[in-house]
Amino acid sequence: MRKKIVAGNWKMNLDYQEGLTLFSEVINMVKDEATGSQQVVVCSPFIHLHSLAQLVKGYTNVAVGAQNAHQAESGAYTGEISAKQIKSVGAEYVILGHSERRQYFGESNELLAKKTDTALANGLLPIFCIGETLQQREANEHFDIIKSQLAEGVFHLDADAFGKIVLAYEPVWAIGTGVTATSDQAQEIHAFIRQELAAKYSQQVADDTTILYGGSCNPKNAAELFACADIDGGLIGGASLKSRDFTDIVKAFN
Ligand code: 13P
């Protein structure tokens, strides 16, 4: 059975102490909630990772992740952080291909394919984000965009390596806007993604892949989204910065 995941993406928010306080609250609230195949992941800024990974020891259903990693193993890349460094502090996941990285830092599918390889080679589990802009949706290009992001970003992987990837569908027009995709719109894309996975790999791989929805997910709409057949959880931005909202979203599974 595929894993159910609610992942928080703190983005570039919270100073060191604020992050620790929030995470402690979240652990206390979710430690008994996330059970079985359900997992809670918090993707923090790099500065928090080591401390959060220490706090999470002993809780098998809570993990921490980074929001980016460099494609090179190591070297003269001033200011960058490697997958190996992230792994060495106890993080398990890394978000790759977030639309903010694609938009503000010019990350292409080709670059993201390299980042994915390096993350996997260092034992990190990528949460690989895909999704169309409003302009692309209005031009009815959303299926083509999703298809090429998958084909160019992750379909070079063999089935074993692909099995370690979590996908996140985040329509760019829904991120931080308060405009959530309707559950029908989200389900339609998630089903399409699973169909692409079945065509590329196998029905088994398609059935086993966790596909998260992200974009203005909140305690009010989470239950309806998570009830969709092909939605296996959420990637939560703004609402992950409030312990009550985030844990209410985790509880939306139950
Ligand atoms: P919001 O939940 O703030 O819309 O952000 C979603 C997101 O980008 C998560 O990666």
Image (spheres, rainbow, N blue to C red):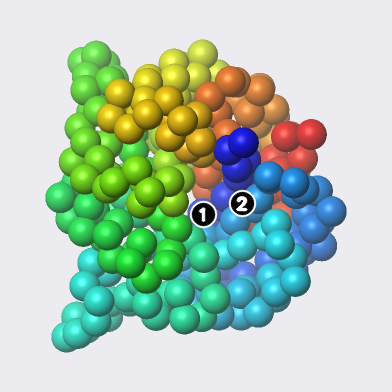
User: Residue 25 in the image: x percent, y percent?
Assistant: 77, 63
Q: Please determine whether, in this image, residue 160 is positioned above or below residue 214.
A: below
The N terminus lies in which quarter of the figure?
top right
Q: Please determine whether, in this image, residue 203 is positioned above or below residue 33.
A: above
Q: Secondary structure at mark 1?
A: strand
User: What residue is shown with label 2?
Assistant: 240
Q: Secondary structure at mark 2?
A: helix
User: What residue is shown with label 1?
Assistant: 9
Q: Quadrant of residue 173?
A: top left
User: Residue 183 in the image: x percent, y percent?
Assistant: 55, 19
- Report whether 217 appears left or right of 114: right
The C terminus lies in which quarter of the figure?
top right
Which of the two labelled residues, at mark 2 and mark 1, occupies the earlier sequence position?
1
Disc 1 CB within 8 Å of nearest ligand 1 atom? yes
Marks 2 and 1 sit apart, C-alpha to C-alpha, by 7 Å
Whether residues under marks 2 and 1 lie with C-beta atoms below 8 angstroms apart, the answer is: yes
Disc 2 CB within 8 Å of nearest ligand 1 atom? yes
The answer to whether any part of residue 250 appears in the image is yes
